[in-house]
Amino acid sequence: MGENDRSLKPTPGANVEKTSASSDIADFVKQVGAMARPGGSQQGRLLFALDATMSRQPTWDLAQGLQAEMFKAIPKESALQVQLQYFRGFGECRASKWVTDASALAKLMSGIDCRGGNTQISKVFAHARAEHAKRRINAVVFVGDAIEENVDDLAEKAGQLGLLGLPMFVFQEGRDTRVEAAFREFARLSKGAYARFDASAPKELAELLKAVAAYASGGRDLLKLQKTASAQALLGQLR
């Protein structure tokens, strides 16, 4: 485990303490824009979870950079709290503390490497519910490329998040159609949104991640300050 990993704690229940298609992005923005941001006057909270298993190794450096960019895009004066969660290896699933220092999380993520193991998406759902029960979370972002768990069981857990008013924004790396179908269903059931994550055009996804971060932290007002096409498209869809 890298030095930066040491400040991450095991998630309860763990064994240890090519271009994003324009239609996918447009659909994602439309779905996000249709959502009302609950508790707009309260401090926003965003859980950012990612799959760090070995299947993501070929594009990990790029993915890592994109994911870190989202944290760096969060203004220091914003009210957004972010928690980083990841799984990898043999039952390893860890989560950071809730922090407002996004640059610290970006640095922390740079020390995470991929390790062989099965997906643990169920632990992401369980952790999101547990944290949401303590204090409301505005959104969950999940980035992954595979599913090695029972899809029906995961779908039920996604539906439970939807009932709690906790939307999940699901980003898929790659083009596995089985994974896509499942990820789309998780987004639908949680009343969130889905978009494809691809290595050949990182800028579009990076801008979209920044827009989601702005939306979660400050609603429309902060989103208006984002001048990218993705942010403006998102703003145009908000009601």
Image (cartoon, helix red, strand yellow):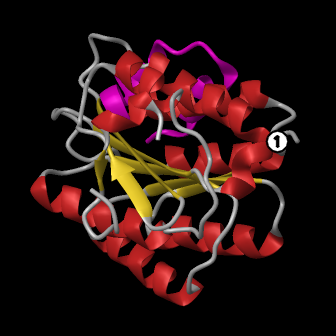
Left or right placement of residue 224 versus residue 104 in this view: right
Query: Does 131 sit above or below residue 217?
Result: below
Please tell me which residue lies in front, 69 or 193. 69
Task: Say if residue 50 shows up in the picture.
Answer: yes
Q: Residue furthest left?
A: 134
**Residue at position x 54%, y 64% in the image:** 187
Residue 228 included in the magenta stretch of the image: yes
In this rendering, the count of numbered labels is 1
Q: Secondary structure at mark 1?
A: helix
Q: Which residue is mark 1?
A: 22
Please tell me which residue lies in front, 81 or 117. 117
Magenta-tinted stretch: 216-239
Across and down, in percent, residue 239 comes to 43, 42
Task: Say if residue 197 shows up in the picture.
Answer: no
Label 1 Cα crowd, 10 Å radius (few <14 / some 14-19 / many 20+): few
Q: Quadrant of residue 107?
A: top left
Across and down, in percent, residue 178 comes to 76, 76
* Secondary structure, magenta segment, majority class: helix
Residue 221 included in the magenta stretch of the image: yes
Query: Does 220 sit above or below residue 138?
Result: above
Query: Does 39 sit above or below residue 13?
Result: above
Across and down, in percent, residue 236 comes to 57, 32
Please tell me which residue lies in front, 131 or 51. 51
**Residue at position x 33%, y 76% in the image:** 160
Across and down, in percent, residue 33 comes to 51, 44
